[in-house]
Amino acid sequence: GAGVSQSPSNKVTEKGKDVELRCDPISGHTALYWYRQSLGQGLEFLIYFQGNSAPDKSGLPSDRFSAERTGGSVSTLTIQRTQQEDSAVYLCASSLEFYEQYFGPGTRLTVT
Amino acid sequence: AQKVTQAQTEISVVEKEDVTLDCVYETRDTTYYLFWYKQPPSGELVFLIRRNSFDEQNEISGRYSWNFQKSTSSFNFTITASQVVDSAVYFCALKNVLTGANSKLTFGKGITLSVRP
């Protein structure tokens, strides 16, 4: 079946602009996660959704970062007023309860 | 607090050699899951195995095997007769179940494995 999909695959933006990253989880997966992967920091957790609510937002690095999930499916991660340190690969994953997380291909964000 | 340590950063072997990737974890919880993921050059993280804290039985899947030892808080991964296609970054990860059935994964820094022909 279809895996986790993310769009865009690459995004180049100027410092100070807002960006939106999209994630389509595997159909039927109730849990959705956002992670960030950068050279210096490895794989960092950002936020987790169960259905449309976010019980754990502890990884969001600042109030410039926000995310929402609608219809228990698609999620959007928004970064406002992007900074160069936001450059990274943003990974989305989904899972069924208690089970392993399946990852999408990621969105590579470059802030110039 | 929970932590995953992958002390090896880069390993290079010649094809057909066996190689073991080490993973040591820290957690205060008694119920948790351990995972290994593979990230090939294409970039997508691929799930390899999940092991819960109550099951210390070792597992073998083809050329892959995993050794889980609670006494040393280790979950090591061995590739037998390595192949060039095994070249990738391998991540070990931990999930504490008591903080929530769908709690986040805590990842190690990853081990870059290069298999030379």
Image (cartoon, coloured by chain):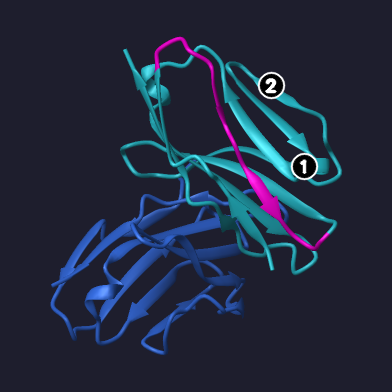
Image quadrant assignment for residue A77: bottom left
Compare residues B28 and B59 and report the one nearer the observer: B28
Q: Verify whether residue A77 appears in magenta.
A: no
Residue A26, position as x, y percentages in the image: 52, 53
Query: Which chain is the one coloured cyan?
Result: B
Figure colour of chain A: blue
Disc assigned to residue B60: 2
Residue A33, position as x, y percentages in the image: 53, 64
Residue stretch rendered in magenta on the structure: B14-29
Q: Which amino acid, by three-letter code, is at mark 2?
A: Ile
SS assignment at label 2: strand
Of badges 1 and 2, the one in the foreground is 1
Compare residues A67 and B82 and report the one nearer the observer: B82
* B29 relative to A49, above or below: above
Q: Which amino acid, by three-letter code, is at mark 1?
A: Thr
Residue B83, position as x, y percentages in the image: 42, 16
Mark 1 and mark 2 residues within 8 Å of each other at the beta carbon: no
Mark with earlier residue (1, 2)? 2
Residue at horizontal 53 percent and vertical 16 percent from the top: B18
